C-alpha cells in the first residue's frame, strides 16, 4: 500500500466552482523490491480480468464502450484502442433533483451518477469502502450538502478524491481506470522516495515552463495555477512537498482529472457556472509530455525506465487515449473550460507530441 498524506483544502486558483477543486496527495515513500525496467505488472481489478496487452494488443473491452476518434490518438496502438461506456449527460434526473433531501444526499449522489456516470459511483463506493482506513473521502471533500445544486457542484471533486483514496488503498502504484481495468506498476516514485523516476516539480526548470509559468499566487489567465499545487517546493531541500513526488503521482493525478472531466460533463447542465474541468486534464497531459522530454534530456535512466517498462507505457497510452475520449466529447461545451484553448495549444507542440509517439514506438506499435 502506498502511504501518503492528503493535503486538504487545496484548489487551483482557476476554479470558479467546487466542481474543479482538487487536492494534492503525497506523503511518505514506500520501498519496493528492485525490478528491472522491463518488469511487467498486473492489470487485475477486484477479481475481474483486465486485458493485459502484449505488444500492440488492445484493452479489455468495456461492453458498449466508445473509442476515441481524435486525430491525436493512434488506432493501431493502445491509446486509440481504449474503450469506455460514455457518460450520458441527457439521462433524466429531474425527479432526483426535486426530491433532494440533505440528510439523504448520498442516495442522491448514487442515483445521479448511476444514471449519468455509473463509473463515477463505482469509484466513490469503492473509495469509501476500501479507502476507509485512510478516511472518508466524501466527508473530507463534500462539505456543503444543503441543496442538489451544491452537491452537483462538488461531484467532480468527490469522484476525483475518492479515486485517490481507492488507488492509495491498493498495493503498488495502482490506477483504477474502469470497473474491469486496473493497472498496477512498481517503482514509479522519485529516487529519493525509493523509485526510479525524479521529482515532478523539476519540470519547472524546463524550456516549456516559461510558456505558462507557475502563478505563484497571482491571478492571471496566462499562468499555471495547477503548478502552484502540484509542482510546488524544492526537491533538493529536506522537507517533503507535493512536487517531490515522482512520475507515479503525476500519472495518478492525470487519471483523476479525467474522472473530474467525465463527472463535470455528466452534470454540466445542472450548473450556472464555468469550471476548469478541461483545463485540469489538459494541464496534466502537458506535464506528462514535458516530464518525458525532460527525462530524455536530463534523466536518461528515468526515461529508460519509463519507456522500457511495459506497465508505465501501458499507463501513459491509456491516460492519453482516455483523456482525448472525453476532451473530444466536451470540445464544444464552453462551460467546461476557462483557459483550455491556450493549454491545448501547448499540448499540440509537435516536439511534445513526439514524446507520446516515442512511447508508442517503445510499446511495439511501429
Image (cartoon, grey):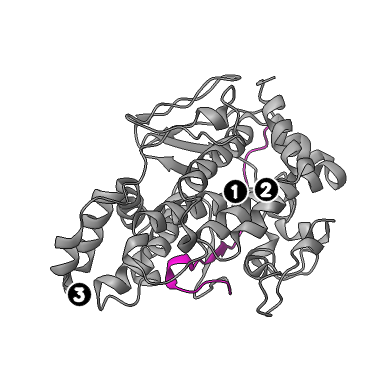
Q: Which residue is mark 3?
A: 102
Marker disc for residue 288: 2
Counting residues from the start of the chain, the first of labels 2 and 1 encountered is 1
Q: Which residue is mark 1?
A: 251
Percent coordinates x, y for residue 110 in the rendering: 23, 56
Q: Residue 268: which quarter of the image? A: bottom left
Marker disc for residue 293: none
Residue 28 belongs to the span the image colors magenta: yes
Where, quadrant-wise, is the C terminus in this rendering? top right
Q: Pick whichever, 68 or 298, lies toward us.
A: 68
Secondary structure beneath label 1: helix
Mark 3 Cα within 10 Å, few/some/many (few <14, many 20+)?
Answer: some
Tags 2 and 1 touching, CB below 8 Å: yes
Residue in the picture at 71% in, 53% down: 346
- Is residue 120 left or right of 231 when viewed as pictured? left
Residue 39 belongs to the span the image colors magenta: no
Q: Residue 182: which quarter of the image? A: top left
Q: Start and end of the magenta stretch?
A: 13-37
Compared with 244, 273 (above or below) is below
Counting residues from the start of the chain, the first of labels 1 and 3 encountered is 3
Secondary structure beneath label 3: helix
Q: Pick whichever, 14 or 240, lies toward us.
A: 14
Total marks shown come to 3
Amino acid at each position: 500500500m502506498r502511504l501518503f498524506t492528503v493535503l486538504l483544502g487545496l484548489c487551483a486558483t482557476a476554479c470558479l466552482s467546487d466542481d474543479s477543486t482538487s487536492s494534492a496527495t503525497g506523503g511518505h515513500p514506500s520501498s519496493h523490491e528492485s525490478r528491472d525496467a522491463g518488469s511487467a505488472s498486473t492489470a487485475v481489478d477486484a477479481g475481474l480480468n483486465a486485458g493485459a496487452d502484449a505488444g500492440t494488443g488492445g484493452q479489455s473491452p468495456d461492453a458498449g464502450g466508445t473509442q476515441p476518434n481524435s486525430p491525436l490518438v493512434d488506432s493501431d496502438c493502445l491509446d486509440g484502442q481504449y474503450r469506455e461506456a460514455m457518460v450520458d449527460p441527457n439521462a433524466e434526473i429531474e425527479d432526483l433533483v426535486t426530491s433532494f433531501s440533505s440528510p439523504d444526499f448520498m442516495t442522491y449522489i448514487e442515483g445521479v451518477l448511476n444514471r449519468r456516470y455509473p463509473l463515477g459511483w463505482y469509484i466513490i463506493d469503492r473509495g469509501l469502502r476500501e479507502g476507509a482506513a485512510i478516511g472518508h473521502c466524501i466527508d473530507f471533500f463534500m462539505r456543503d450538502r444543503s441543496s442538489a445544486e451544491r452537491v452537483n457542484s462538488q461531484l467532480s471533486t468527490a469522484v476525483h478524491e475518492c479515486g485517490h483514496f481507492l488507488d492509495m488503498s491498493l498495493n503498488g502504484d495502482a490506477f483504477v481506470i474502469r470497473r474491469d481495468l486496473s493497472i498496477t506498476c512498481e517503482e514509479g516514485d522519485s529516487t529519493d522516495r525509493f523509485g526510479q523516476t525524479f521529482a515532478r516539480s523539476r519540470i519547472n526548470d524546463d524550456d516549456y515552463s516559461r510558456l505558462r509559468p507557475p502563478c505563484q499566487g497571482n491571478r492571471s489567465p496566462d499562468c499555471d495555477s495547477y503548478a502552484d499545487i502540484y509542482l510546488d517546493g524544492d526537491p533538493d531541500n529536506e522537507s517533503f512537498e507535493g512536487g517531490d513526488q515522482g512520475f507515479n503521482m503525476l500519472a495518478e493525478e492525470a487519471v483523476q482529472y479525467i474522472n473530474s472531466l467525465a463527472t463535470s460533463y455528466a452534470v454540466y447542465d445542472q450548473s450556472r457556472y464555468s469550471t476548469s474541468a478541461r483545463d485540469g486534464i489538459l494541464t496534466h497531459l502537458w506535464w506528462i509530455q514535458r516530464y518525458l522530454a525532460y527525462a530524455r534530456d536530463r534523466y536518461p535512466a528515468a526515461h529508460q525506465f519509463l519507456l522500457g517498462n511495459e506497465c508505465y507505457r501501458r499507463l501513459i497510452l491509456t491516460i492519453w487515449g482516455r483523456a482525448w475520449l472525453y476532451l473530444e466529447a466536451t470540445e464544444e461545451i464552453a462551460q467546461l473550460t476557462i483557459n483550455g484553448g491556450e493549454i491545448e495549444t501547448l499540448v499540440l507542440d509537435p516536439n511534445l507530441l513526439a514524446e507520446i509517439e516515442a512511447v508508442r514506438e517503445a510499446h511495439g506499435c511501429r
